[in-house]
Image (cartoon, helix red, strand yellow):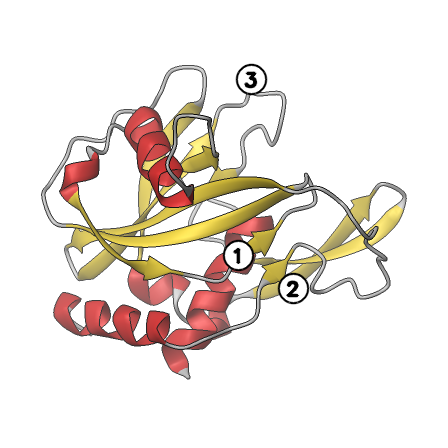
Amino acid sequence: MAAAEQQAALCRALSGGAEPSSDFDLNPAVVLPEGRKLRPAGVLVAFQPGANGLDLVLTKRSSRLRHHPGQIAFPGGKVDAGDADETAAALREAHEEVGLPPGHVTLLGRLPVHETVTGFLVTPVVGLIHTPFEPRAEPGEVDEVFAVPFAHVTDPGRFVIEARRWRGQRRRYYTVPYGPYYIWGATARILRGLAERIVA
C-alpha cells in the first residue's frame, strides 16, 4: 500500500465512532473505583513518509526515568496549564521530546481516549508529518527516536497477548514487537485499536 493509500486508510479509520479503551480491557476481573480522577494527557501518533510508505514515529523512554523507564511510547504527556487542550499538549511534547516542529504536522483526527493504569486519560492525536525533520531525542527523557512501518502497526495479526504479574495479579496486555523494540502496554493497545479500524 502506497503512502497516499495509507493516508486515506487513516482518514477512513478516524471517521467512524469507537469505544474508549483502557489498560484493563484484557483484565475484566479488575474493578475500577467509581469517581476516580484521571489526569488528561495527549500523545502524537505521527506518521511520516518512509522508503515503503508511511512510518510511525515512536520513542524509547530514558532508562533513568522514574516512571516507565525504557518503555516504547508515543511522543506526548500530560496536559499542562498552558496547553489549550490534549492536541496542544501532544504537539508541544513532540517538539520537546523528538524535535518535531508543530508546523510540520497535518492533524488528521483523534482516536478514542485510553485510560492507563497510572491514572491518565490519554487522547491519541493522529497526524501526518508533511515536512522532513531531524529527530532529536530530549536528553534525560528519551533514549532513542525510531520509526516503524505503517504495515506493521496496522496489521491486527501482528499483535500478541502476553501476561505478567502486576501488583500481585496476573495482568494481560497487547504487544506488537518490532525488531529490538518491545512495544506493549498502552502504546500497543492504542495501536491495536487503530489496526482494528484500518481493516474494518
For image coordinates 42% across by 37% down, the residue present is 76
Which quarter shows the N terminus? Answer: bottom left
Residue to which mark 1 is pinned: 113
Q: How many marks?
A: 3
Q: Secondary structure at mark 1?
A: loop
The label number, if any, that marks residue 161 in the structure image: 2
Q: Position of residue 54 (x, y in %)?
A: 22, 59
Q: Secondary structure at mark 3?
A: loop
Residue to which mark 3 is pinned: 64
Q: Secondary structure at mark 2?
A: strand
Q: Quadrant of residue 37?
A: top right
**Badge 2 vs badge 1, beta-carbon distance below 8 Å:** no
Indicate the amino acid at tag 2: Ile
Residue 183 visible (yes or no): no
Residue 67 visible (yes or no): yes
Which of the two residues, 19 or 68, is positioned nearer the viewer here? Answer: 19
Q: Position of residue 155 (x, y in %)?
A: 41, 71
131 relative to 196 in the view: left or right: left
Q: Position of residue 55 (x, y in %)?
A: 26, 54
**Badge 3 vs badge 2, beta-carbon distance below 8 Å:** no
Indicate the amino acid at tag 3: Arg
Q: Residues within 10 Å of mark 2 (few under 14, many from 20)?
A: few
Cα distance, mark 2 to mark 1? 21 Å
90 relative to 131 in the view: left or right: right
Q: Residues within 10 Å of mark 1 (few under 14, many from 20)?
A: many
Q: Position of residue 67 (x, y in %)?
A: 62, 27
Which of the two residues, 42 or 97, is positioned nearer the viewer here? Answer: 42
Vertical comparison of 130 with 191: above or below = above
Please report whichever mark, 3 or 2, sits nearer to the chain's N-terminal start.
Answer: 3
